[in-house]
């Protein structure tokens, strides 16, 4: 799920950036530092949408670096248990398959894949129904439900299922190409 | 009436009994440290306690322990367990021996308990007493929820839905869950590998059927499936009586005893209204004030007692005529019941009295004064006409006026609060119980003194011919 929230961060700025465009430099550095990171508390920081306020800088003893407390608005993405996501399959093996929904990696184990889908090894490993009409392979898009998350300080990993109504392949790359 | 109550309560009692036997049959409430010997094995006590509770409403835990010949500690442990299970509501309070008597009175009124034989000791020492009562509404929900969870769990396992797959390393028997999957994949083959010994991990079959792990993957899965199905079927079969009972109970109104205080008040009031309030002078002297213990419900209690006392006095004859008919507490009254006016009226008033004392009294005042104004106007005119037309009967009029002035004096000299005070005067004449009430004790002397004033002063010429009637009106209005 996406959230638009305000976060705060202390930015250290090198003295060489002190000048007219100090503020721009600060924002640029903030985006570079923060976007794409993951915190266990808020999830993945997808994008910074605005700067709320920049506090007074404090010169560090000995280094000349200046610390600015910056409040910024950002879009974060945090997966939740029970959430339905659309994801792209990245890897298929005998144990199940891995998929990605944006920055989040999701594992779907083989017993959470419908029973009528069988694993087919080979050049392009895949799960296929007995009549061959549905195929899950690399780059397939699937709709899945998250049934468990593991949230570390810097990483979020999910396990999902496609064994439920309206879950499974939503577009078949084989058919498209 | 009794049959009505039984109609709604009995299915719930049966539900409790069934649930007790289904779920709490082998619950033992021993501490873990004690070794389980044959002697200390107290399985089944839970069922006995629940059964005993279905035969009671609120019960003091000591009394229950005595009745069941159980050690009170043991009983308390069991009850605490049931409290956690949300089957039982408990209430603890500090009270004197007197306070406990209110409970005894309430028990006597319900007629299903034994009045505690502690009338004698009037110690003012505070003891903490615990009371417990079955919470039928909650029990119904708890049992349903429990069944739902059981079914859901088995069904989920059956469809292996929403379960986090576990993996185990056959070499070092280290366990992983699917959440570790990212770390376990190897670039070389399509299996998961153990982090420590690089062995190939195998998926572990689900916990419920874990014992039959071993032979081929598919075989195990099929067998597990079978087993779960059996389990589900067994559950459906064995719990069928319970589920049937749940269905039966569904549309019935749940017997509600309310909180301990409310229950006591209801039953004590019912008892007072039955006319057996005269036999306990000690109660009236202590005024239901819970022996001086600060209680949040004191105000309520006071009002309740006042009104029910009046009712008891007023209705005594009809009650006696009806024999053992009891006043129904509100939770027993249902639509379609045929009730006498007293029963209906009294219970209504009890409900009204659940509101605050001040509200009741202030509305009292307002209404009586309004009424008085109207009456006054009419009487003014009447008196004027009377004077003009019937001069010759003036001496008679004088006599008549005298009596009126006496009463009207009281109104003007004492202001608006007069009606209540006069009521109090009335009450002190009418009912013995009120003497017990602290607040009204204080107000009694002024009422007496104003009664003297009637004769001495002659302030008001306005006549209120029917003031005496009005007093009666007040009372009537209160009773209605």
Image (cartoon, rainbow, N blue to C red):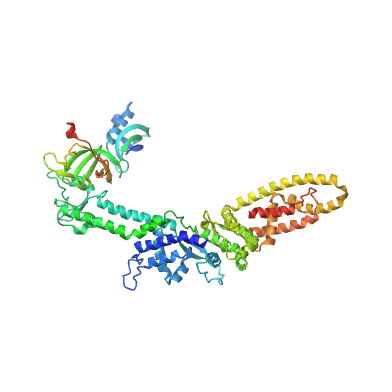
Q: Nearer the viewer, residue A83 or B270?
A: B270
Q: Position of residue B5 (x, y in %)?
A: 49, 60
Q: Nearer the viewer, residue B322 or B92?
A: B322
Q: Nearer the viewer, residue B84 or A7?
A: B84
Q: Position of residue A152 (x, y in %)?
A: 27, 45
In the displayed structure, does residue B55 sit left or right of residue B458? left
Q: Total label count?
A: 0
Q: Position of residue B184 (x, y in %)?
A: 18, 47
In the displayed structure, does residue B65 sit left or right of residue B409? left
Quadrant of the image occupied by residue A72: top left
Q: Nearer the viewer, residue B322 or B275?
A: B322
Q: Residue at x 71, y 57 (%)?
A: B447
Quadrant of the image occupied by residue B246: bottom left
Is residue A148 placed above or below A63 in the rendered structure?
below
Q: Is residue B76 visible?
A: no
Residue found at the far bottom of this picture: B39
In the displayed structure, does residue B236 sit left or right of residue A174? right
Q: Position of residue B363 (x, y in %)?
A: 63, 49
Is residue B411 placed above or below A37 in the rendered structure?
below
Residue found at the far right of this picture: B392
Is residue B77 placed above or below B373 in the rendered structure?
below
Q: Is residue B403 visible?
A: yes
């Amino acid at each position: 799920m996406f959230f638009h929230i305000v976060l705060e961060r202390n930015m250290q700025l090198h003295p060489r950036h002190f000048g007219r465009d100090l503020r721009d430099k600060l924002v640029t550095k903030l985006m570079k530092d923060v976007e794409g990171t993951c915190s266990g508390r808020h999830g993945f920081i997808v994008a910074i949408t605005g700067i709320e306020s920049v506090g007074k800088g404090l010169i560090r003893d000995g280094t000349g670096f200046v610390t600015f407390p910056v409040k910024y608005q950002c879009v974060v993405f945090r997966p939740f248990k029970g959430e339905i996501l659309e994801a792209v399959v990245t890897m298929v093996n005998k144990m199940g398959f891995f998929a990605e929904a944006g920055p989040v990696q999701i594992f779907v184990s083989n017993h959470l894949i419908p029973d009528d889908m069988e694993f087919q090894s080979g050049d392009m490993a895949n799960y296929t129904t007995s009549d061959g009409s549905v195929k899950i392979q690399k780059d397939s898009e699937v709709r899945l439900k998250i049934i468990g998350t593991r949230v570390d300080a810097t990483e979020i990993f999910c396990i999902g299922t496609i064994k439920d109504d309206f879950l499974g392949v939503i577009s078949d790359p084989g058919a498209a190409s | 009436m009794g049959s009505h109550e039984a109609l709604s309560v009995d299915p719930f009692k049966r539900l409790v009994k069934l649930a007790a036997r289904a779920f709490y049959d082998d619950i033992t409430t021993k501490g873990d440290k004690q070794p389980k010997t044959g002697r200390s094995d107290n399985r089944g006590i839970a069922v006995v306690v629940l059964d005993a509770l279905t035969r009671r409403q609120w019960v003091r835990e000591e009394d229950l322990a005595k009745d069941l010949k159980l050690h009170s500690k043991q009983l308390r442990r069991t009850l605490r367990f049931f409290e956690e299970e949300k089957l039982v509501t408990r209430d603890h309070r500090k009270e004197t021996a007197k306070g406990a008597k209110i409970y005894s009175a309430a028990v006597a009124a319900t007629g299903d308990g034994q009045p505690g034989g502690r009338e004698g000791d009037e110690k003012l020492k505070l003891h903490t007493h615990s009371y417990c009562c079955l919470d039928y509404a909650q029990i119904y929900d708890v049992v349903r929820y429990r069944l739902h969870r059981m079914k859901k769990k088995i069904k989920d396992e059956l469809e292996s839905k929403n379960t986090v797959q576990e993996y185990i390393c056959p070499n070092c028997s280290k366990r992983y869950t699917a959440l570790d999957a990212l770390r376990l994949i190897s670039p070389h083959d399509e299996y998961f590998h153990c982090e420590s010994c690089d062995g190939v991990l195998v998926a572990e079959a689900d916990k419920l059927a874990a014992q039959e792990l071993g032979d081929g993957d598919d075989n195990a899965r099929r067998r597990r499936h079978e087993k779960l199905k059996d389990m589900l079927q067994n559950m459906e079969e064995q719990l069928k009586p319970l589920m049937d009972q749940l269905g039966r109970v569904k549309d019935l109104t749940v017997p509600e005893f309310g909180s301990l205080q409310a229950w006591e008040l209801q039953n004590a009031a019912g008892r007072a209204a039955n006319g057996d309030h005269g036999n306990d002078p000690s109660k009236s002297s202590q005024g239901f004030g819970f022996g001086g213990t600060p209680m949040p419900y004191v105000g309520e209690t006071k009002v309740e007692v006042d009104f029910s006392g009046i009712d008891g006095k007023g209705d005594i004859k009809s009650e006696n005529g009806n024999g053992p008919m009891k006043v129904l507490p509100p939770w027993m009254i249902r639509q379609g019941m045929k009730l006498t006016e007293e029963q209906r009226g009294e219970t209504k008033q009890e409900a009204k009295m659940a509101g605050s004392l001040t509200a009741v009294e202030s509305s009292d005042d307002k209404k009586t004064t309004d009424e008085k104004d109207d009456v006054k106007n009419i009487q003014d005119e009447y008196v004027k006409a009377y004077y003009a037309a019937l001069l010759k009967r003036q001496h008679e009029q004088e006599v008549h006026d005298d009596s009126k002035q006496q009463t009207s004096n009281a109104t003007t000299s004492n202001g608006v609060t007069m009606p209540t005070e006069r009521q109090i005067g009335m009450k002190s004449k009418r009912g013995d119980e009120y003497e017990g009430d602290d607040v009204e004790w204080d107000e009694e002397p002024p009422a007496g003194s104003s009664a003297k004033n009637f004769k001495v002063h002659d302030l008001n010429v306005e006549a209120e011919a029917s003031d005496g009637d009005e007093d009666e009106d007040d009372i009537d209005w209160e009773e209605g």
